[in-house]
Image (tube, helix red, strand yellow):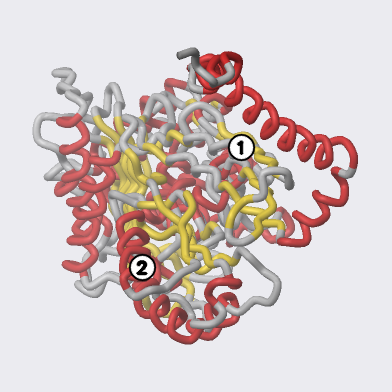
Amino acid sequence: MPSLRNPHARRRGRLRGSPQFRLRVGFVLIAMVLSVFGARLVQLQALDPGSYAAMAAAEGTVEVALPAARGAILDRNGEPLADSVDGRMVVADPSLTAEKAPEIAAFLAERLSVDYIDTLARLREPGSRFEYIARRVPSTLAGDVLKEAEERGIDGLSTRRDPLRTYPAHDVAANMIGFMGTDEAFGGMEQVFDTYLSGVDGVARYNIGAGARIPLGINQVRKAVDGTDLTTTIDRDLQWYTQRVLREAVLRAGGQSGIAVIMDSRTGEILADADYPTFDAAAPEESPTEDRGARSINLAYEPGSVEKVLTMASLIDLGRITARTRFVVPGSLERQDRVIHDYFEHGNIKLTAAGVLAKSSNVGTVLAADRFKRGELEAYLKRFGLGRRTNVGLDAESPGILPAPSMWTDQAEDRIAFGQSLSVTAIQMAAAVNTIANRGVRISPSLIKGEAIRDDGVSVGTDVATTRRVVSAHAARQTTLMMERVVDPDDGVAPNARVPGYRVAGKTGTAQRVGPECGCYDGTFTVSFGGFAPADDARFTIYVAIHDPRNGGGGGSVAGPVFSQLMGFALQRYGVAPTGRKATVLPVSW
C-alpha cells in the first residue's frame, strides 16, 4: 500500500537533523551576537565617547606614583655603602576601608608603626579611591601585613613597588654617606647628590569603578627613570678598620671625639675618613644630631705644631733657610704682646732647622719665621689650601680661618707660624701635608671617583681635581728629611708613630681649643699627627686628630700610635713594600 506521508516533509526532516543545517544556524546566531557588540562599540567610540569617558571619570581617577630606584653609593671597589632594595608601599581604597576604618587603623598602626590618627583620616578620605598608608616598607613585612589583613576580613588594602634604602655597612662611612628619611635626604652624599641619585619618579593614571579599572577611561603610564650610582674613593674595608682603631684611641685617651683621614698621596683620593663618635645610617634616630656630620670637613680648630711643616717648607722654598740652618733657641722669647714658650723647659739650646722641627720648638719656629717678609707666610698658607674650602664633595664644609690682611700683625704671624691664631679642618691639613708628600704639588682631595654634579651645580670628583705647585721639589724633599727626624727614637718627639720596616715622615700637633661659650681658650686641647710613608716615595698620607684627651698625652703619644697602626695596615693592604733606601740623617743640633 503506498505511503500517505508527504515525501517533501520527509526530506525537510532529514535536513533539520543534518550537520550542515546546525552549522548554518550557529553561524547566524554568532553573527547576531557580534552585530550587537559592534553596535555597542560604535555607540561608545563613535557616537558618544565623551559622555562615557565622563561617566568613567565620575567613578574615580587614580594617580599612582611609580617610584624610581635610588642610585647606589658604592666604595671604590663597587661594594655598596648605600643601596636600594625591593620595597613596597601600602595603599588603601577608602571606598572599601571607611566602614571599618577604626579597626583597620589600629591594625596598621600596630603592624607598620604608622600614626593612628593620620591613618584613620586616610582610610576615611571622602571621594578618594587611593591613599598612601606607609612608604618604603620591606617586602616581607608588607606581604605579611596584607596576608594578615585578608585573614581578618579586611578589604581595600594593596601594595605597590616602592624601593627601600638600605645601609648594609651600617656605621661604615655613615658620616660621609648621610641617610634617607621617608621622603627626604639628610646630610652627607645622600643630601648633596640627591638629584643625581634620585632619578625621576614615574606616574600611572587610570579610572576605576566598582573596584576595578574602567577599560575605556584614562589609562596613562610614564615609566620611572632610576637614579645614577655614585662611586666614591672610599675603601670600605680600610674605612671599617680606621673607624675601629680611632674609636679605641678616643676611648683610651678619654677624648671627646676624633678624626682620621687617609689619602692616596699620588691622587688625592680619600681612602678613609673616620669620625668618632659616629652613627648607624640604618638607624640614625638612635644617635644625637651632633654625631651625624662629617667633622673632617665641618669642624674647624687650631692645628698646633703640624702647621710648622708648612712654615718650614715655605722658608726653604724662599731660600731663607735650609734644613741645616743654625739657631740659638732660648727657653722663652719676649715678643710684642706676650712671651712665647716651648712645651719643655730649657735654657739656650743650639738647634738646626731640622732640630727645631724634631723637637717641635715654638721659639725656634718663631725665630725662623722672622725671615719672612710681610705677606709671604699668608700667601704660602693660602697656596697650601688653608682658609678656603677644599670642595672635596660634601656640604657644610668649613673654610677654616686665616686672619684678614688687616688683622695679620707681627704678633699674629708669630702665633700662626707654630699653629695658633688660625683654624683648619682635618681635610685641609691632610691635603696640606700631602703637598709635601707629593713633592711640593698640592692635589685637590676627592671623595668621588670620576665626576658627579652636586645639587648646587658644582662638579666634583677625581676627573675635575686640580693640581698646583706650592713649593719646589727640593723644598719638599728637604722638609721630608726634617719630618723623618720627628719620629726618631733618640731626637724626635713621636717615636711611637714609626712603622717597622718603613721610612716615615710626620709631625705632631698639640693646640689649645676655643670654647664655643666664651670664645676663648677653655683649657682643653686637640692633639694630632700628620705624616706619610714611605717617606722617600709616599703612597699614603694620614692625618689623625683627637679632641680633648683626658689622659694628659700629646700628639706624639696619643695620635702617633694611631697613625702607626693605620699606616701599617694600609701599606700591607695595598702591598706596598719598603723602598730599602736609607735616610739622610740630618743633624738636629750644632
* For residue 460, above or below residue 456: above
Residue type beneath disc 2: Glu
Badge 1 amino acid: Lys
Query: Split into 4 quadrants, where in the image is the C terminus?
Result: top left
Query: Badge 1: few (under 14), some or many (20 or more) residues near its Cα, within 10 Å?
Result: some
Location of mark 1 (residue):
223
x%, y% of residue 108?
41, 76
- Residue at 36% over, 47% down: 273
Q: CA distance from mark 1 to mark 2?
A: 30 Å
Q: Secondary structure at mark 1?
A: loop
Residue pictured at 41% horizontal, 57% vertical = 304
**Residue for point 24% across, 74% down:** 550
Q: Is residue 171 left or right of residue 121?
A: left
Q: Secondary structure at mark 2?
A: helix
Query: Which mark lies nearer to you, 1 or 2?
Result: 2
Note whether 159 is above or below 480 in the view shown: below
Residue 483: quarter of image: top left
Residue that carries the numbered disc 2 in the rendered image = 150
- Chain-order first, disc 1 or disc 2: 2
**Residue 340 drawn at (x, y percent):** 43, 65
23 lies above or below 535: above
Q: Residues within 10 Å of mark 2 (few under 14, many from 20)?
A: few
Question: Residue pushed farthest front?
Answer: 1
